Amino acid sequence: MQKEPAVSADQMLAFETDCHLFSGCGFEAPGLHSFVFEPMFSIGGFDFNKPILLALVGTLAIVWFFWAAFAKPKVVPGKLQMIGEAGYDFIRRGVVYETMGKKEGEKYVPFVVALFFFVWVMNLWAVIPLAQFPVTSIFSIPLGLALVVYITWVGLTFKRHGFVGAFKNFTGYDKSLGAVLPMVVVIEFFSTLIVRPFTHSVRLFANMFAGHMLVALFTIATWYMLNGIGIAYSAVSFIMTIVMIAFELFIQVIQAYVFVLLTCSYLQGALAEEH
């Protein structure tokens, strides 16, 4: 049986434009329907909805920016090159070198930089006019990124330590633990190989999901209470909307930073001689 179409993009906030406080209609709060989008078009049987398009546009914007910044580098950098170098150097020195060291970490700098800017831009869509939706609030996006990190980390661990060494790395195997060693091995194996990619993705997803819900809630409330004496309440809600957007701008950067910081921590653990 064919499924009914998902909620369309113009229904994302799910409220009537003529619905206000004291007008006889109830407040329609945002919910899970705010994260479901009807396909805008299809290519080769693949449906493109709003989050997918935002992800594609964001990716192209990142590629264009770094290409424009570094295609023809100059001794005296222009504005784009200066911004690009500042961002690249911040991740290289402030994240990769600090967690993995310069010698081991240098080869992973491009990977971590790409991760940071992708996550940040996907988060940033939440406050961009017309877009106003964080792509990372769709769980499959953070999960996909976490799996990329997971595969890289596990593969690197096996490559560096071999099968036996990787097992010890994953489980914290240490004979000195004595009788509790089996329990520690089971707990560490489960938490490291099973739980870690889930928590890595959920941390980003949950923050972006909750942030978007709050911004949407105050935005809808501002419009809903814009009627009669409710205008005073609407003004308060509008102020809260601005505050939440400003807070979201801060959280977006922090979550991108935390995501790559954890990534580097996992890679550093794979490269470490002892775990």
Image (cartoon, rainbow, N blue to C red):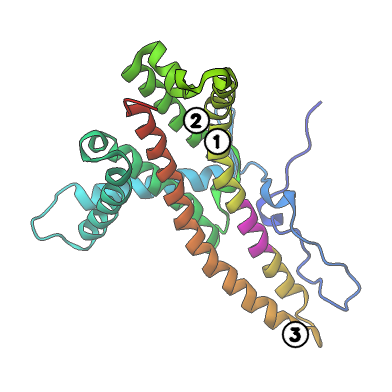
In this view, the residue farthest toward the left is 75
Q: Which amino acid type corresponds to the residue marked 3 in the rendered image?
A: Ile
* Residue holding disc 2: 147
Whether residue 71 sits left or right of residue 270 in the image: it is left
Task: Identify the element where label 3 is drawn.
Answer: helix
Picture quadrant of residue 10:
bottom right
Magenta segment, which residues? 209-216
* Residue holding disc 1: 143
Q: Badge 1 local density, few (<14 within 10 Å), some, or many (20+)? A: many
Task: Return the x and y of residue 252 as percentages of the image width and height.
Answer: 49, 57
Task: Return the x and y of residue 236 as percentages of the image width and height.
Answer: 69, 81
**In the image, is residue 89 above or below residue 96?**
below
Whether residue 150 sits left or right of residue 30 in the image: it is left
The quarter in which the N terminus is drawn is: top right
Q: Are marks 1 and 2 in contact (CB under 8 Å)?
A: yes
- So how many labels did they put on this image? 3
Q: Which amino acid type corresponds to the residue marked 1 in the rendered image?
A: Leu
Give the camera-side residue of 192 and 28.
192
Most common secondary structure along the magenta stretch: helix
Q: CA distance from mark 1 to mark 2?
A: 6 Å
Q: CA distance from mark 2 to mark 3?
A: 47 Å
Task: Return the x and y of residue 256 as percentages of the image width and height.
Answer: 45, 50
**In the image, is residue 190 above or below residue 116?**
above
Task: Identify the element where label 2 is drawn.
Answer: helix
Give the camera-side residue of 76 and 209.
209
Task: Identify the element where label 1 is drawn.
Answer: helix
* Residue holding disc 3: 231
